[in-house]
Amino acid sequence: MSTVSCEHFEEVADQIVRLYPELAAREGGGLQARVAALVNRLDDQFLKMAIDAGAEEIAIAEYVEKSLLVQAGYFESFPGEGLMEGAIGTRPPAACYQCYPQLSGKVLGESGLWTCVGTCGRNERETGVGRLRIFCMREIILLGSAAWVREQRARWLTTIARFARSLGLQVDLVPASDPFFGTGDAHGRKLVQQLKELKMEMRTRVGESIGLAIASFNLHETFFARRFQLRLRDGTDAYTGCVAFGLERWAMAMISKLGLAHALTVATEEL
Ligand code: AMP
Ligand code: ZN
């Protein structure tokens, strides 16, 4: 059973109050706890799908050392992207960064799946529906040969699209790119990312936002393998990919479509 330790549901609860004042009035002070319950039930479903597919769970921390993000090439890939830095430390901008060092130097076989969940932070410049500064992300990490990772990504695209529809959500799958605003190297990489369809997003309607990304399906080629020494049994650099779910956005999309009570019932049903 998932117990996402994310206690930062004020932001998402505030957005729900703004979008659905009548719901907030009905729920009174219980809204935040019920949204947290919905996030956890959704995460249970993603975790179950990952475990059923053979994934191993990896525990990650709430804060990271900046040196990890340097090693992961974050500052080259996302120049100008704001991090959430506080007195206690830096919030990771994505959950999967903390998995690669844990896999580094291990004998990884031919392929494997891992999963993790954690609190992420992004100092978003814009505010809008579902654009939170602190949010929970579940990820599934795919590692193997190029062909295996591509095939896995295609499988997860189908599985998650089916899951979203079973929850009553209408979704679109669109090629995307990470929103870096830099020029030069990062700009070039953005074009390559679009050209090779390295990033696919699953989008849905939430309130006035008609195309909010609730999940992304990413191919990293050997980018992380080279930075974290991820080698397959035959000694070659592993190809990696990840599937990332923004848990609050799934909760918001379901509330938007079904209302909170019905969303909780549907998210709790067996897959
Ligand atoms: P990305 O690494 O940008 O593909 O993000 C993975 C997923 O995290 C997205 O598909 C969203 O569901 C979620 N996400 C990203 N940024 C935010 C945000 N500012 N607030 C809430 N969820 C987010
Ligand atoms: Zn990732």
Image: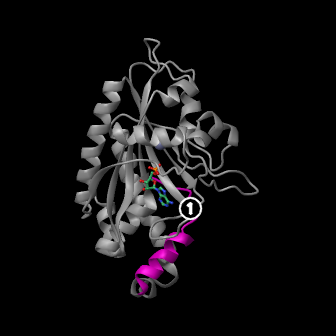
Residue highlighted by disc 1: 124
Is 13 rendered above or below residue 133?
below
Q: Is residue 242 visible?
A: no
Q: Amino acid at mark 1?
A: Glu
Question: Where in the figure is residue 184, as x and y percent of width and height?
Answer: 54, 40
Horizontally, is 53 left or right of 74 in the view? left
Q: Is residue 201 visible?
A: yes
Q: Is mark 1 within 8 Å of ligand 1?
A: yes
Is 18 rendered above or below residue 198?
below
- How many numbered marks have been drawn onto this rendered protein structure? 1
Horizontally, is 182 left or right of 144 in the view? right
Is 3 part of what is drawn in magenta? Answer: yes
Horizontally, is 29 left or right of 173 in the view? right
Is 55 rendered above or below residue 8?
above
Horizontally, is 257 left or right of 109 in the view? left
* Camera-side residue of 267 and 169: 169
Q: Which residues are magenta?
A: 2-21
